[in-house]
Image (cartoon, helix red, strand yellow):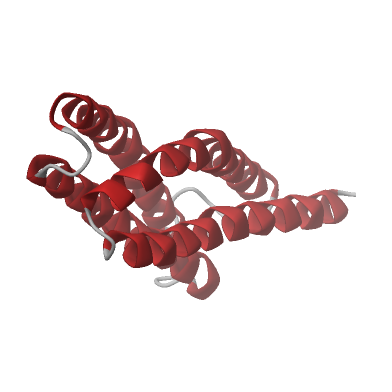
Amino acid sequence: MIAALYDWLLFFHILCAIVWVGGAISLQIIAIRVNRRGPAAAYALLGDFEFVGTRIFMPTSLLLLVLGIWMVSIGPWSFHQTWILLGLAMFAYSFVSGAFFLSPQLRKTKEVADEKGPDSAEVGELTRRLFIVSRIELVFLVLIVADMVLKPFL
């Protein structure tokens, strides 16, 4: 019974990771293409990024975390294992980055765009920073996947 539950938890955990990491990779590819069109085009994309971030990535990542904790609690793993601690640390970075940098920076970018226009150099710079930090976060997401699959220091 526990083995079947664990398998279902693992299935949904992996599905959440696919949605989160795959979605983030897709958004970065779109951002690179749109960013070449200039600050106004990149700024226009931010609303869609915010929508996906708050309505798709946030709930999916939280569900992924809950499922992972549940799997550790019923499976053969321990919260003292380095690969689990690394995964939790990278998850924490992603959560803090989104909540305390990306969201406030996005609001600031919108305010500057309302004041100075979406084509302003300042909006371009703020948007560029958002994209850079989100790319760094994407690297961490890929590292989490590698950590979960390879289980270094096991």
Is there any visible trace of residue 76 in the rendered image?
Answer: no
Question: Horizontal and vertical percent for residue 33?
Answer: 36, 67
Count of numbered marks: 0
* Nearer to me, 70 or 28: 28
Residue 96 found in image quarter: top left
Residue 7 found in image quarter: bottom right
Name the residue located 45 percent from the left edge and 67 percent from the top edge: 147
Classify residue 53 as left or right of residue 109: right
Name the residue located 42 percent from the left edge and 48 percent from the top edge: 88
Residue found farthest to the left: 121
Name the residue located 31 percent from the left edge and 32 percent from the top edge: 103
* Nearer to me, 70 or 134: 134
Task: Give the vertical position of 8 relative to 119 (above or below).
Answer: below
* Nearer to me, 92 or 115: 115
Name the residue located 72 percent from the left edge and 51 percent from the top edge: 12
Classify residue 58 as left or right of residue 121: right
Task: Give the vertical position of 2 relative to 51 (above or below).
Answer: below
Residue found farthest to the right: 1
Classify residue 89 as left or right of residue 125: right
Question: Horizontal and vertical percent for residue 43?
Answer: 30, 44
Is there any visible trace of residue 134 in the rendered image?
Answer: yes
Question: Horizontal and vertical percent for residue 26?
Answer: 49, 63
